[in-house]
Image (cartoon, helix red, strand yellow):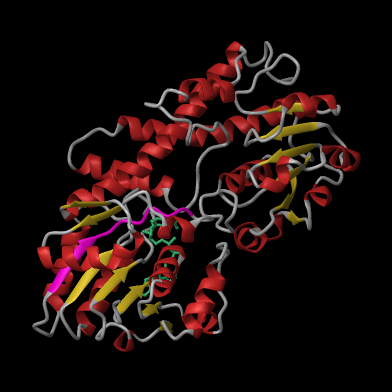
């Protein structure tokens, strides 16, 4: 066991990392500049929704293995391993904003108390490891030795603990043998496949993985558009194509697009890196462009069906960027709502857990409903924007009895079109043309 792990940043990645390493028997201190977040964690409350995390935090905090700090002088000097898990948001030009990473590197430099392995878990452009090492070497007052490691995180919000504890692989970008041994020892209890590379390669692996997954989604959405025009079903097409082991079906679901705090910004950052080194990132740009078009197309199709959106009442089910999280960063549901509001529609929204986080973005421009049926009251259109399980078998008969209109826009292809139409609705999915169901795809869209 290690008695000396510090984690900088207590967001989704930092807190899961800290709590999981504590669960494995290590003593971990989590550090954040956000005082209210630390206070909340000290009283056992996790400030965001992640299944199982609050229980894990409470258990390890009461066992004394997990503590929370705002003062770096109480967290960094004793740590042999310091994880960096701060945000790397997108800047106006698409590049990754490394301000938090730089600030955290300065904090480490100013508080080093022993030889330390500095592990970057934030998603960062290639060469950030060099930047962190340079900042620390330049500013450190002591003679302590530091090694900078890249250990990108692949967890998914909604299943973060399981992903952390049972990873497909652990990527370790290390440029020195001692740090490699330390990291292997730390991760040994997980019994996972370890891929050891140099630091720059590890940094590229993370961006490559996210870019590929996002590209699969945009690929499915492009095929979906063709399916609508030719009268094919994209779900079946992807099942058929994905049955080829070289392809696989994961991340080939058509819908209103990808979002969240990672894919959009990571693609933009990778494009930026590509341009910096003289590579034209045409595939990455196309992936982002197709994704943006999903929202425009959804709005156009709804508008075409109802006539004009001005004065139309729309029930939107789902606000989070995906199920099992309250994270609404870059959520397609929010982008769709913004576009509908812009056109003069009135929106009543529901989400099982993301109403508070979405409320910070949308404020009083939207009505928030206690449940999906309440949202559908008086609605002309019912939109499924996030594929929460509870919308998959929502009783549409009840929703219909509350509605004024009869269009179901299934932005996540979670409902059976035939069943929806049999209930007396008009149905629109993404790439799910059927003669029976897809009232909007006729001569208008073909
Ligand atoms: P987040 O925004 O939820 O949390 C970041 C935390 O870092 C915040 O609490 C912030 O107050 C804190 N912070 C910022 N600067 C600090 C400093 N100098 N000292 C101490 N604390 C500081 O971020 P996140 O979603 O956990 O993501 C962190 C990184 O991990 C990003 O680079 C992201 O791209 C990457 N990542 C995220 C996910 C995910 O699903 N969220 C998955 C894999 C990788």
Residue at 70 percent across and 31 percent down: it is 302
Foreground residue among 159 and 426: 159
**Could you tell me residue 264's position as x and y percent?**
43, 45
Q: Is residue 338 magenta?
A: no
Q: Is residue 351 above or below residue 378?
A: below
Residue at 42 percent across and 23 percent down: it is 244
Observer able to see residue 214: yes
Quarter of the picture for ligand 1? bottom left
Residue lying at the far left of the rendered structure: 143
**Could you tell me residue 281's position as x and y percent?**
29, 34
Residue lying at the far bottom of the rendered structure: 74
Foreground residue among 340 and 398: 398
Please provide the residue range marked out in magenta: 146-156
Residue at 36 percent across and 86 percent down: it is 71
Q: Is residue 153 magenta?
A: yes
**Could you tell me residue 431's position as x and y percent?**
60, 23
Quarter of the image with the N terminus in it: bottom left
Residue at 28 percent across and 44 percent down: it is 272
Number of marks in the image? Answer: 0
Does residue 188 appear left or right of residue 347 in this picture?
left
Q: Quadrant of residue 191?
A: bottom left
Foreground residue among 159 and 351: 159
**Could you tell me residue 26's position as x and y percent?**
35, 77
Does residue 134 appear left or right of residue 408 in this picture?
left
Q: Is residue 312 above or below residue 203?
A: above
């Amino acid at each position: 066991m290690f008695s000396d792990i510090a984690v900088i940043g207590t967001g989704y990645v930092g807190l899961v990392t800290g709590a999981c390493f504590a669960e494995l028997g290590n003593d971990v201190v989590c550090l954040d500049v956000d005082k209210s977040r630390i206070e909340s964690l000290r009283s056992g409350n996790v400030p965001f929704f992640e299944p199982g995390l609050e229980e894990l935090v409470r258990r390890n905090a009461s066992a004394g293995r997990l503590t929370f700090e705002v003062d770096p002088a109480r967290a960094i000097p004793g740590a042999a391993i310091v994880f960096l898990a701060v945000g790397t948001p997108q800047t106006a030009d698409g590049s990754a904003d490394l301000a938090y990473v730089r600030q955290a590197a300065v904090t480490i430099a100013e508080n080093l108390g022993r030889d330390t392995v500095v592990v970057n878990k934030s998603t960062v452009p290639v060469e950030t490891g060099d930047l962190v090492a340079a900042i620390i070497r330049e500013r450190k007052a002591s003679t302590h030795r530091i090694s900078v490691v890249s250990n990108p995180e692949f967890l998914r919000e909604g299943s973060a603990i399981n992903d952390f504890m049972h990873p497909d692989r652990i990527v370790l970008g290390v440029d020195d043998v001692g740090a490699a041994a330390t990291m292997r020892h730390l991760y040994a209890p997980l019994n996972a496949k370890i891929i050891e590379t140099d630091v720059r390669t590890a940094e590229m692996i993370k961006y490559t993985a996210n870019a590929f997954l996002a590209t699969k989604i945009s690929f499915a959405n492009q095929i979906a558009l063709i399916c609508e025009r030719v009268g094919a079903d994209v779900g079946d097409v992807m099942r058929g194509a994905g049955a080829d082991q070289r392809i696989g079906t994961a991340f080939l679901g058509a819908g209103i697009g990808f979002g969240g705090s990672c894919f959009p910004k990571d693609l933009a950052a990778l494009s930026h890196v590509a341009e910096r080194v003289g590579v034209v990132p045409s595939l990455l740009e196309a992936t982002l462009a197709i994704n943006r078009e999903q929202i425009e197309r959804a709005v156009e199709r709804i508008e075409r069906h109802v006539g004009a959106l001005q004065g139309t009442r729309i029930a939107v089910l789902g606000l989070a960027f995906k199920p099992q999280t309250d994270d609404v960063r870059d959520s397609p549901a929010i982008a769709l709502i913004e576009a509908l509001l812009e056109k003069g529609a009135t929106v009543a929204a529901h989400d099982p857990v993301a109403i508070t986080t979405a409320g910070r973005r949308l404020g009083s421009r939207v009505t928030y409903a206690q449940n999906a049926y309440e949202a559908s009251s008086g609605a002309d259109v019912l939109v499924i924007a996030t594929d929460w399980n509870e919308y998959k078998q929502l009783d549409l008969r009840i929703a219909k009895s509350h509605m004024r209109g009869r269009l179901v826009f299934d932005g996540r292809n979670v409902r059976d079109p035939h069943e929806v139409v049999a209930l007396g609705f008009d149905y629109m999915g993404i790439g799910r043309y059927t003669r029976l169901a897809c009232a909007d795809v006729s001569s208008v869209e073909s």
